[in-house]
Amino acid sequence: MSFGSSSRTVQGVLLLIGLILGWSSMAGEPGPVIPKGKGEQCVAETDFMRRNHMDLIVHQRDDTVIRGIRDEPFSLVECVDCHVQLDEDNQAVRIDEEGQFCASCHAYVAVKIDCFGCHAAVPDPVVPDPVVPDVAQQDSVDGSHWLPNKQLLAFKQTLPTAVPPALSHHKNEADTVRSE
Amino acid sequence: MKPTPSDQNKAVSARRSFLQRLGLLGAATAVAPALLPAISRAKVTALKGVSDEQRWGLMIDTSKCATGCDACVRGCHDEHGISSTGNEHTDAQWIRKIDLQDNLTGQESSLPMMCQHCDSAPCVDVCPTGASFKRADGVVLVNKHTCIGCRYCMMACPYKARSFIHEPVTDQKSLAPRGQGTVESCTLCVHRIDADDDLQPACAVSCTEEGHSAILFGDLNDSESDISIAIAKHDAQQVRSDLNLNTGVRYAKL
């Protein structure tokens, strides 16, 4: 009996060690490392973009292709322009390549992107002054240094009510006109 | 039970307010239709999309188009990042040059052939997903987001104006997305004409730069526009006018 009891104690200790190890490895999960974009701010707040960028893109593609509306505040071309990284030879790296802005998160959450089967994954080569990437300024997941976009804030102020700006801007533009 | 005078007064006042409200409703109904068009017009201008006020088109003056010159083809392919895949038979071709000879008179002519941006486009009729569509301003396009690559539109097109992309595409231009498994054709350079009314499609620009000025771009709906005046002056024809497609591309002196 005493043998059995000590065996149970060993089992318990092993289980405890296993749990601690498992928990500590989970807590140390680094998450995707997202390269920093150009400039000080994105077109909208980081949290909003993280949750809603796909809706913005899908919503706007029909407006652009079918209705020819090309002056909206969001565009896939601008995503690429700001977030593309340059290699040692100052050449733009495809944004859907491993470790790059789009691919790092999408690989982490295992969501395939097919945007760049058709859309350009690097800016057009006539970019005037390419910025050398600053490796020290790699952005962590929180992205806290991204400030809200002034242009978008100004746009928000023209809206009649406080609503998530991007998804409802059409409706509200129409509402504004109607109320005049 | 007989109604008291106060009950009668109440009934009269209720009837009066009912009639007043009815009158207001009538007035509102009469005014509303007058307001509606104003609202919908305002919405359209606020969104700055395309409208059917314009119908964009081209006129090709075949007497100015030079045999052996392919400036328009090169201009188009540069603009949209179209390059050879090494397999000539399946290369994309948005615009091509055709040389014609009249068997009777021996008269030779040369012309560019591309999507004719038909008003009643057969490609739009046959598309099973609605990916092949005509914009409000008459430009016929493929919405590659919904194109499934079935190639029905290519079979329907009388002008052989469309190409299927067999191989993966890289190095696209940012304003001209192109990809494997979809059909594509001349877009009348919508990315240019949407951006600025003064911008011309790349083929017309290249032709002018080459010194031929055989391609004229403009608004077919505006009878005062250069293109409308030129079409009327030269009695510019539709290719396969027997099909009654009301094409947006017209050929002069054919």
Image (cartoon, rainbow, N blue to C red):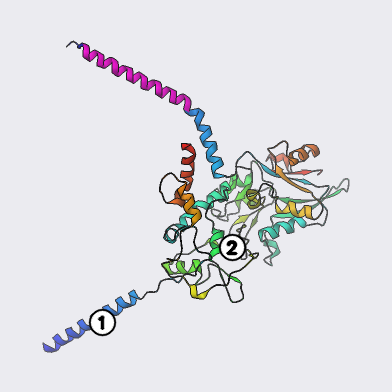
**Reading the chain from its start, which is encountered first: label 1 or label 2?**
1
In 3D space, how far apart are the residues under numbered discs 1 and 2 (Cα atoms)?
50 Å
| Quadrant in the picture for the N terminus of chain A | bottom left
Query: Magenta segment range?
Result: B5-31
Q: Is residue A64 above or below residue B77?
A: above
Q: Say whether residue A69 is visible.
A: yes
Residue neighbourhood size for the residue with mark 2, other residues' Cα within 10 Å, grouped as few (<14), some (14–19), many (≥20): many
Which quarter of the figure has residue B2? top left
Q: Name the residue that disc number 2 marks.
A: A120
Q: Chain of mark 2?
A: A
Residue A50 image offset from top left, x and y in percent: 43, 61
> Measuring 44% from the left and 57% from the top, which residue is drawn there?
A52
Residue neighbourhood size for the residue with mark 1, other residues' Cα within 10 Å, grouped as few (<14), some (14–19), many (≥20): few
> Measuring 71% from the left and 54% from the top, which residue is drawn there?
B202
Which quarter of the figure has residue B163? bottom right
Left or right of A21, for residue B124: right
**Which secondary structure, mark 2?**
loop
Dominant secondary structure (helix, strand or loop) of the stretch shown in magenta = helix
Q: Is residue B98 highlighted in magenta?
A: no
Q: Is residue B25 highlighted in magenta?
A: yes
The amino acid type of the residue labelled 2 equals Ala
Residue A10 image offset from top left, x and y in percent: 20, 85
Which label belongs to residue B245? none
Number of callouts: 2
Left or right of B51, for residue A21: left
State if disc 2 and disc 1 touch (CB < 8 Å).
no
The amino acid type of the residue labelled 1 equals Ile
Which quarter of the figure has residue A29? bottom left
Q: Is residue B177 above or below residue B198?
A: below
Q: Chain of mark 1?
A: A
Q: Name the residue that disc number 1 marks.
A: A17
